Image (cartoon, rainbow, N blue to C red):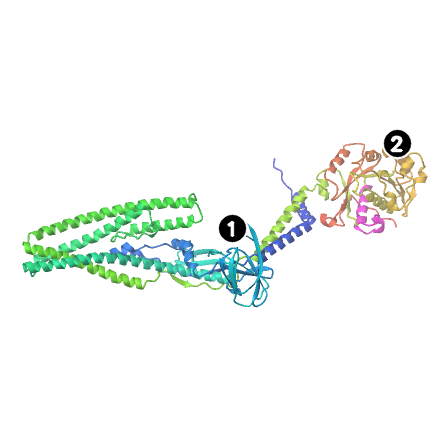
Amino acid sequence: MRHEVSPIDDEIDIKEIFRTLYRYKYMIFFFVLIFGLVSAYIAYFKANIYEASSTVEVGVQDRSSSSHDILNAAMDPGALSSDTEIAIIKSRFLAKKALKYVDFTHHYYTTKKFKEIELYKNAPFRVGMLRGFNVSFELYPIDSKHYRLVVEKAKDSNGTEWHYDKVHLYGEEIDTAHFHLNVVRTGKMKANRYRFDIAKDNTPSGGVNAAQTSKYSTILRISYEDNVALRAQEYANALAKAYIEQNVEKKTKEATLKLNFIDKQLKRINENLKSSAVKIEEFKKGTNTISLSSKAEVIITQMSDAEAKLDTISMESQILNNLYKQIKKEKHLESISIAGIGSGNEALSSQITLLQEAILKKQVLREDYTEMYPAVVKLKKQISYLKRSIIDTIKNLKVSINEKKKLLEKSIEKYQKNLNKLPADERMYGQLQRKFAVNEKIYSYLLEQQSATAIIKAATVSRNRMLDSALLPASPVKPKRKMIVLVGLILGLIVGISLAFLRNFLDDRIQTEEDVTHATDLPMLGYVPHMKKSTDEIKVFTSPKSAVAESFRNLRTNLQFMVRKNRSHVIAVTSTIGGEGKTTVCINLAGIMSMAGKKTILLNLDMRKPTLHEKFALSNKYGMSTLLSGSTTLKNVIQKTAYENLDVITSGPVPPNPSELIQKELMDKLIDKLREVYDVIILDTPPIGLVTDARTLMHKADTSIYILRAGYSKKGFIHKIKELSSHREIQGLAILLNDVNIERSGYGYGYGYGYGYYAEDKK
């Protein structure tokens, strides 16, 4: 069955939460303070990170408008996507080029406001080093000519520790077994101490990032983060510059390859052309042939055109064969030229572009991951698929080219048959003229391409261009110091609150009334606020208007409803262990009763550790021990106090058998005798958790008050109270919560447990 939680229960839970927070407020504040200070320390000493950004435009070539020329198609690298360009920017290949312009090897430091900062080019000295890389050196300026060089602790290649501390002149060569360097002063030494270390390899210390400015934009932003603002600016610009330069180098290399190819073809065609010219001249001299008939000229022209086309197709076939072999060998695939054959090469060009991109992405990933990395495995499968697809496309193109070759060969054969029908001299001269015309056409075409390519090579510019160079960062992007401190404070608050609730959960001490009422159904007589330590513990007399006095008035009122009419009220006060304030409660309860005009007597029955006589500054020569042992009379043990209507019987000397004395029949007679004289009889009993005396006395009382002390008594003590409540002989058992912190527990001075109004104190 589902249990519905009432609004009152919710309110109590919320109050308990706030009470817990208030109870441990100093601990929570301590953790907030500690975490705040630690986060502030981290934020202050964390090195500044500056970001500089430059932007470049990626000139992606539009292949739809490119020429269908055989050489341009053969040498064209295809159109690269922005993703590929980003991978190039982040590659070590480009970093190597950019590092020519930026120095990451020399690091110079000084300390300002307790923080070590890197000076970079603003250092007042420069260091040249041949040996001793990656060792931390300290430099202490002495005067304008001397400095002190210190190495506190370092290890050589054998693992042996060494140190160094000597004074040197600026510019002096220092050659030791562990290092070889010289320090040259370049400016005024403003600090008392500097530190430097020289790296052997020039490697960027920050992170490079490249991204499109928008989803479909071809503009890339190149960003670099570094702890030195100037170096961040220089390296961001160096990356952009190296990116532009590598594109120019690539285009220049393509033009060079194209020129080499043209030169080889020109040399071959030139030799053929010379040979054809010589043969024609020799034939003319031998046969006196001047010209051809119109029919022969038509046939020769047609054959020349067909043979020129056949040579072009043969060249295409050769390029396809070379590409096929390169794909099969799987070598240098990222740098292969796209062999665009005629106007049907778009599919092949696209496939090779995708292959090159996949290979480049795989190379970038392999710098940081193994072959088993999922992304690498996926790219390997993609590369394998693309290679098979390219091979199939090449095979299909070769089939198409072979069909064209067969058609052209049939046409040439047909023209040859028609030419064979002509007279022999005319036929021979026509063949020589035809070969010359074919070579001349190819030679003219190659000369034209050579000239155009030479111009392109001389005026090569990158399709990419820098739009904005990086500016010097004015402020760091990291760390977010306010955010670090805020996170630290929040973490401190979370940890403090968590520990507060954990401590509250693990704390088995009684703190509030709810801790008692949730564990037992016994009535609560009230609570007594916390009393500051003082020599005078009778607060109801010394501070009659205090919260303590008000709480005892409230207790007196509640006890009035538990007394039988026309009979003295015997009240037994006990606790589980010592230190719960039992005697203090007895004293103040007796005092508040006497102030109401009730004749009251207080009996100290805790004969093992008597303290009551000290509170009233009375003699303890005679008391309960001497009275119950028959050594004295009742009249001799009753002592008057300085307060009206309040008498006391002290414990007397400590007896060897207090339990036996209390259990005597004389104890019952004593209470009956006192009932005849006094309105209220208060029994200050021993702690019930230590001895059984209190239980015996509680059987004789009309009301038994069980004292629990907030922040001191264990919650397990309530089980002892439950056990006592099961004894029917014990009458009027109720609980009083002592030493309650009013502010922490949320009680107010006007809070009461009473069932009615209490009588005014008699003056």
The quadrant of the picture occupied by the N terminus is top right
Q: Which residues are magenta?
A: 533-560
Q: Nearer the viewer, residue 15 or 82?
A: 82
Tag 1's secondary structure? loop
Residue 301, image x and y in percent? 13, 57
Q: Nearer the viewer, residue 422 or 254?
A: 254
Left or right placement of residue 481 versus residue 553 in this view: left
Tag 2's secondary structure? loop
Three-letter code, disc 1: Ser
Residue 490 against residue 575 in the figure, above or below: below
Residue 352, image x and y in percent? 32, 50
Q: Residues within 10 Å of mark 1 (few under 14, many from 20)?
A: few
Residue 328, image x and y in percent? 30, 45
Quadrant of the rendered structure where residue 525 is? top right
| 550 within the magenta span | yes
> Disc 1 marks which residue?
157
Sooner in the amino-acid sequence: mark 2 or mark 1 = 1
